[in-house]
Image: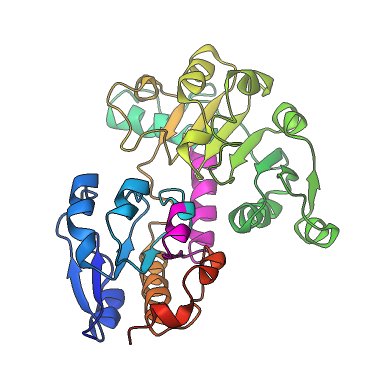
Amino acid sequence: MGRPRVFVTRQIPPPATQSISSVCEVVVRKGQEPPSKRELIRNLPKFDAVVCLLTDRFDEEVLTAAPALRVISTMSAGFDHIDVKKATENGIYVTNTPGVLTDATADFAWTLLMVAARRIGEAERYVRGRKWRIGWSPTLLLGGAIYGKTLGILGLGRIGAAVAERAKGFNMKIVYHDAVRSSPETERALGVQFVELEELLRTADFVSLHAPLTSETRSLINEDRLKMMKNTSVLINTSRGPIVDEKALAKALRQGWIAAAGLDVYEKEPISPKSPLLRLQNVVLAPHIASATRESRSKMSEIAASNLLALLRGERPPHLVNPEVEQIRPLSQISML
């Protein structure tokens, strides 16, 4: 048996590719654009394993075209870009990189919250546009206070909990909603109170989304739910774009149902040039960079490599998404090193 062949869908931080290259034959795809479905179908049959990113779509058709594939190691916490059910049926092990981006994403959620609440984006454009004519004005670009307000967290996983920890420094009342309620010990430690979704939306001054994308959460924040929110509230989304109905959000921002929003993720990425959000001043728009620190991206790539190499050695990886795959294809049949 020759060295395992590994396909890396795009250039990632070097420590990962170096560690994989030491024992595997590695092909790193050039360019920053995600590979097309046609390209994946054409190339994957040649490889035993792949390191991918969250913008690479591994649907049933792509997976069926790669009968030799043993491992998909995604350099992301989320894995909704992979048909995990089909991968499992095909005996393909799927791994991810949770945890490492928690602090970076929580920090960025707070960045969006503060920028949106205090209208920093508008203020920066105001100065750059040479519109600043009076040194100080008591009514110029008034925003909303943060300290002492109510924060509503939808999804109290790792990132949601980290956002809650940061809210303590602002003396905020913290309410949360999740499909599965946390333990009393966790609630006490974080200083959070469980409420139903409708109550969260009606009472929170800031709503921060940290839920996974599922059939239940898709378009969860729709027109009806946006109308429940305070007209002074701010919506923050660093989770998954399709959780928010963007057409409804644009209407809410335009008609003043809510005061502002801060978004890092979108229904379609990159955001459409025709999106009405681009024409609104009271929304902060970032290009999916919540985990974009040198430290977190490097660690993500290292974990993706560790997951992949563990499997190719026939070992259980640190972060296995589909443990039930072992019933289809035991680890002994994955080993190539």
- Compared with 221, 109 (above or below) is below
Residue stretch in magenta:
86-115
For the C terminus, the image quarter is bottom left
Q: Residue 155 in the image: state x and y as whole percent.
A: 65, 46
Q: Residue 103 in the image: state x and y as whole percent.
A: 53, 61
Q: Residue at x 32, y 23 (%)?
A: 131
Hey, which quadrant is residue 174 in on the image? top right
Which of 261 and 13 lies nearest the eye of the viewer? Answer: 13
Which of 319 and 247 lies nearest the eye of the viewer? Answer: 319
Residue 108 falls within the magenta-colored stretch: yes
Q: Residue 201 in the image: state x and y as whole percent.
A: 70, 30
**Is residue 154 at least partly visible in the picture?**
yes
Which of 284 and 188 lies nearest the eye of the viewer? Answer: 188
- Compared with 83, 320 (above or below) is below
Name the dominant secondary structure of the magenta segment: helix
Q: Residue 37 in the image: state x and y as whole percent.
A: 24, 46
Q: Residue at x 24, y 49 (%)?
A: 34
